[in-house]
Amino acid sequence: MVDVMVIGGGHAGVEAALACARAQKHTVLYTLHTDMIASMPCNPSIGGPAKGIVVREIDALGGEMGKAADATALQFKMLNTTKGPGVQCLRVQSDKLAYMRYMQNALRQEPYLTIKEMMIEGLWCEAGKLKGVIQADGKCESARVVILTTGTFMSSSVLVGHSAIPSGPQNEPTTMRLSQSLRDLGLSTFRLKTGTPARIKTSSIDFSQAQLQPGSDAFLCFSYETTKIRPFSKQLPCYLTYTTLKTHEIIRKHLHDSAMYSGLVKGVGPRYCPSIEDKLVRFVDKERHQIFLEPESEALDTTYIQGFSTSMPHAVQEEMLRSLPGLAHCVIDQYAYAIEYDALDPLQMKPSLENKIIENLFTAGQINGTSGYEEAAGQGLLAGINAVRKLEQKQPLILRRDEAYLGVLIDDLVTKGTQEPYRLLTSRAEYRLLLRHDNADERLTAYGYEAGLIKEERYRNFLAKQKAIQECKANLETLRISVTSPFASYLSEQGIELKEGISALELLKRPGVMLADMARFMALDWEIEVMKRVEIEVKYEGYIKKAKRDAAHLQQLEARRIPHDLDYADIAHLSLEAKQKLGEVKPLTIGQASRISGVNPADIAVLNVYLTSYSHKTFDHKEKHVDDQQV
């Protein structure tokens, strides 16, 4: 019997398998094609708004995605640099072939991991407890824990025009029987839809008609262990073009031919990544839409047409693409398509990512109703960590909303559920100033170290960095800047006047005063990462303190546990909707209960009063039980 079986070799499956194997649990990764492990069937990029911070969190916990993205990037770009630190994030354009090779090599190096190329068609359960899996040949294989990371492959159909073909992404097979197996075990599934744009031969594009989109000329990376990246001079550019009136005319003329509008699509598509025809219907007043031209790999003559997802027939796609500036003579390498697939209702999931109905079954990635490589990888990593903790009879790792975007993601799924492919956004995080690109290590490295995924040397380096940050702040507090100092003269040239001497810490709070400039004039020797962290914490001190106070209130609510077997139907004065929603979700804490849609503050007040009474009754019962035993 193996310890852990991971079903699916996408981004969630890779992180789950690595986490379990590196914890020295005998792990088997089942995949349909070994050479497609860690593939990028959609956008060849990693990171972006919110997602880039998720990749930093994955790295801080000991995952692999950040290292792989750094090692195989074609371009690095920091987004939202004109905005506050709470929304700044890194995005890399990835070499999708190099990324796959990196991850496949990382898996093969793990001695506790075995990779099997085989389809799984069902789960083997007894009395609500998972025993293993059922292979395509009908053979049962036993496992202590199973992690399902099937992505978009469960009963999936590729949709183009008026045709629907049973298939997974990139013409791979689909697992037609697994969904029914899950339903037979009492789990609820629903249909979702996503899609991908066309790929064009790069050599057939006239880039002179598009706008150059270079990366950022700075040392940027996802992993705290990365020391070398592709030089800026060797990074590949992306380009920006726009739809035209001709494009819109073609789409409107053929709208009835789109699978999206012909009635063929049954699943709900992603709200924040709609098809181009959906954009035209939803945003009728917009004269044009952005289209990004992005390289897929140095080894391929293909460009990804970002923002041009569609399910139109092939002939219509050709017309649409050739109406774009720079693509008049384009050669299509791969046509766009939509894909429908089965997902599990995430309300059936515990915050640990273990299923509520079937013990020892964990799920991660798009099977939980999410979208995106980064969301999938983060779930896979946490599912792997918690699968190991379940085997070792330890409490699960459940990240709070003020600790990580991954905490926001999972809390949203298990508390609110989703009716469409869920995508992380900075606006979903009420404590986003605490969840920054720069401080993921401070928030999560200790958890990764405890899980055994952060090695001793890295942990010592992390502690040294934290110490350096505190020392830097202390030095700035004692360092005085006089009005006659060279730095004061420099500030005067920048329009910042000093009327009297001031501590460096107080001066840093002023707009326009940068710690890097101060260090240069004052001959201060601090590492760049240390100075970045200190500058943010000093300049945004008031906002950060307020966010921490709010988070402390949240922690008080999270500290009040709710018994799992509580019968909400018996609680007087709860609204009918609250009884229904609370009974369905079965929240672990008052904090989680307060975030359930349909549960209002009055319901929480009633629940708080009831729990106080419930606790006293439970305590009295335990006291009586002890007295009876003593008698």
Image (spheres, helix red, strand yellow):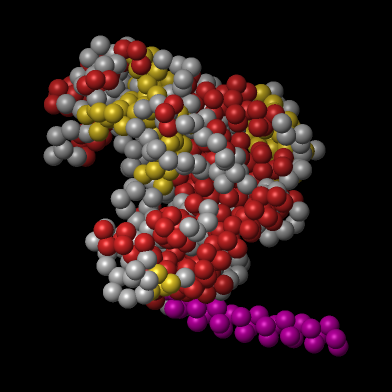
Residue 3, given in percent of the width and then of the height, sits at: 76, 42
Query: Left or right: where does residue 485 sit relative to residue 30?
Result: left
Q: Is residue 136 left or right of residue 559?
A: right
Taking the magenta stretch, the answer to whether it contains residue 612 is yes
* Residue at figure coordinates x 50%, y 59% from the top left: 524
Relative to 16, say whether 8 is above or below.
above
Residue 452, horizontal then vertical, whole percent: 71, 50
Which quarter of the image is occupied by the C terminus? bottom right
User: Predominant secondary structure in magenta?
Assistant: helix
Position of the N terminus, as image quadrant, is top right
- Looking at the rendered structure, the number of numbered marks drawn on it comes to 0
Magenta extent: 603-631
Q: Residue 77, located in which quarter of the rendered image?
A: top left
Which residue is nearer to you in this view: 57 or 602?
57
**Residue visible at 34% across and 68% down?**
484
574 and 404: which is toward the camera: 404
Identify the image quadrant of residue 265. Answer: top left
Residue 409, x across and y down, in percent: 47, 52
Is residue 321 found inside the magenta-colored segment of the image?
no
